[in-house]
Amino acid sequence: MGGCYDARAAPGCSVCREVRGGACVRRAEEDKTDRASAKVIRAGAGDTCIQEATSGTPESTKCKTGKCDVTIGGSQYCSQCSKDTEFPINGVCTTEKDTNTCATGACTSCKAGYFLHRGGCYQIGGAVGLLICDDKTATSGKDGICVSCHEGYFKTQPKQQISNLVLPAVTQLLLIALRV
């Protein structure tokens, strides 16, 4: 894990309603009156994220249909590339994954100097990375992790920490179902 969620977009908005100092201070289940849904804007020609022309027909350097679903700084980025051999690095589909852990068009963990956000690895201190993570340089011993999230984002929890949280019964059942 080690990334940051955007409190204004899924999946972050379904977990946290208010963020201060890089931490969630008001969880979604505490605010049932705010039912405004986050709309995903599909990127078009000339935008940051370009999708494959035909669904299911992989194209180099393009995003899989429906996967231009990451909004960072008002621009759309890809969470999964069209080709299984390309991966979203700094929001761009490329074959150059380096030592980031990526497969089937998306990443699951990132090397030192990068952090994971919604299926892609973003460079710590890079132009796009700074829109999510305030870290200017990688922190020793924190390979693949953003230490300080940008305003409006909050830290994701490693799976082992999530299982130890005290959560409402419905959420606990959902987490159990996801583990199966």
Image (cartoon, rainbow, N blue to C red):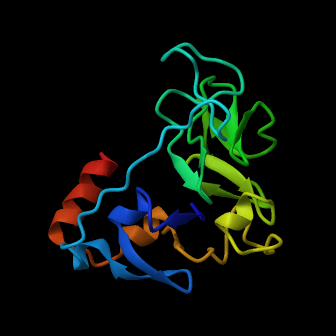
Q: How many marks?
A: 0
Residue 37 placement, left or right of 50: left
Q: Quadrant of the N terminus?
A: bottom right
Q: Is residue 19 above or below residue 43?
A: below
Q: Position of residue 8 (x, y in %)?
A: 44, 65
Q: Nearer the viewer, residue 22 or 74?
A: 74
Residue occupying image coordinates x 77% and y 30%: 95
Residue occupying image coordinates x 68% and y 25%: 85
Residue occupying image coordinates x 45% and y 68%: 7
Q: Position of residue 89 (x, y in %)?
A: 72, 44
Dividing the picture into quadrants, the one containing residue 50 is top right
Residue occupying image coordinates x 80% and y 70%: 138
Q: Nearer the viewer, residue 131 or 118?
A: 131
**Residue 122 in view of the camera:** yes
Dividing the picture into quadrants, the one containing residue 141 is bottom right
Residue 153 placement, left or right of 29: right
**Residue 110 in view of the camera:** no
Q: Position of residue 144 (x, y in %)?
A: 70, 61
Q: Is residue 45 above or below residue 88?
A: above
Q: Nearer the viewer, residue 173 or 84?
A: 84
Q: Quadrant of the C terminus?
A: top left
